[in-house]
């Protein structure tokens, strides 16, 4: 699904993609914040392995359309639908994102939509800080981690919707 949707997205106007992504992550954030208020703390369920390809398809399609959206789709599906803890959901989302990112990157690069002069320094910066972020995620309590994730999504959606006006 990543490859198919990435081919479609590479032909869309960048502003439309920006608004789609902004709306998408705002809806995910609101769903996560509302869910925490409507239910008590949920116990982790055993993983429904036959449902994982469906999560992968949804995540892969959003990777192709929205870039890193695959992890943002997979995490709420894994916590809300499949009852996994936030850190488990995020680690499983990374298993989806790593290969899907390569497919999406190759597809966008083939459509000349990748600025390598900007992308490579981003990669280096991320490589130097990812382990610190993972260590922090494992120290935070489950509820705080889920709330932080939802607020990060909401803040990103707001930032994207305001666009260049913030710069």
Image (cartoon, rainbow, N blue to C red):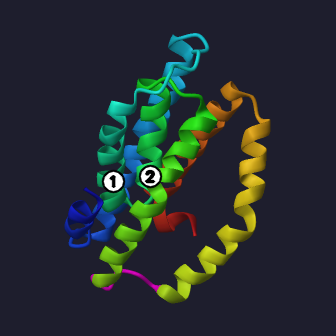
- SS majority, magenta: loop
Mark 2 to mark 1 CA distance (whole Å): 8 Å
- Name the residue located 27 percent from the left edge and 66 percent from the top edge: 6
Task: Say few, some or many: other residues with alpha carbon within 10 Å of mark 1 (under 14 / 14 to 19 / 20 or more).
Answer: many
Whole-percent x, y for residue 52 in the image: 37, 37
Quarter of the view holding residue 86: top right
Q: Disc count in the image?
A: 2
**Range of magenta residues:** 111-115
Q: Is residue 15 above or below residue 30?
A: below
Q: Secondary structure at mark 1?
A: helix
- Name the residue located 80 percent from the left edge and 37 percent from the top edge: 139
Q: Which residue is mark 2?
A: 96
Q: Given the current orientation, which residue lies at the most extreme bottom position?
A: 117
Q: Which residue is mark 1?
A: 60
Task: Say few, some or many: other residues with alpha carbon within 10 Å of mark 2 (under 14 / 14 to 19 / 20 or more).
Answer: many
Whole-percent x, y for residue 78 in the image: 46, 33
Q: Is residue 9 above or below residue 23?
A: below
Residue 139 left/right relative to 116: right
């Amino acid at each position: 699904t990543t490859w198919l949707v990435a081919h479609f997205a590479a032909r869309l106007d960048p502003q439309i993609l920006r608004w789609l992504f902004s709306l998408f992550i705002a809806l995910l954030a609101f769903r996560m914040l509302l869910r925490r208020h409507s239910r008590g703390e949920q116990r982790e369920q055993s993983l429904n392995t036959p449902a994982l390809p469906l999560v992968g398809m949804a995540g892969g399609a959003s990777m192709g359309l929205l870039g890193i959206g695959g992890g943002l789709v997979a995490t709420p599906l894994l916590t809300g639908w499949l009852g996994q803890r936030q850190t488990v959901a995020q680690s499983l989302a990374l298993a989806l994102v790593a290969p899907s990112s390569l497919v999406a990157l190759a597809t966008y690069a083939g459509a000349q939509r990748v600025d390598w002069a900007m992308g490579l320094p981003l990669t280096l910066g991320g490589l130097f800080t990812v382990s610190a972020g993972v260590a922090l995620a494992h120290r935070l309590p489950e509820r705080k981690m889920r709330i932080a994730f939802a607020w990060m999504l909401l803040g990103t959606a707001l930032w994207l919707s305001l666009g260049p006006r913030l710069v």
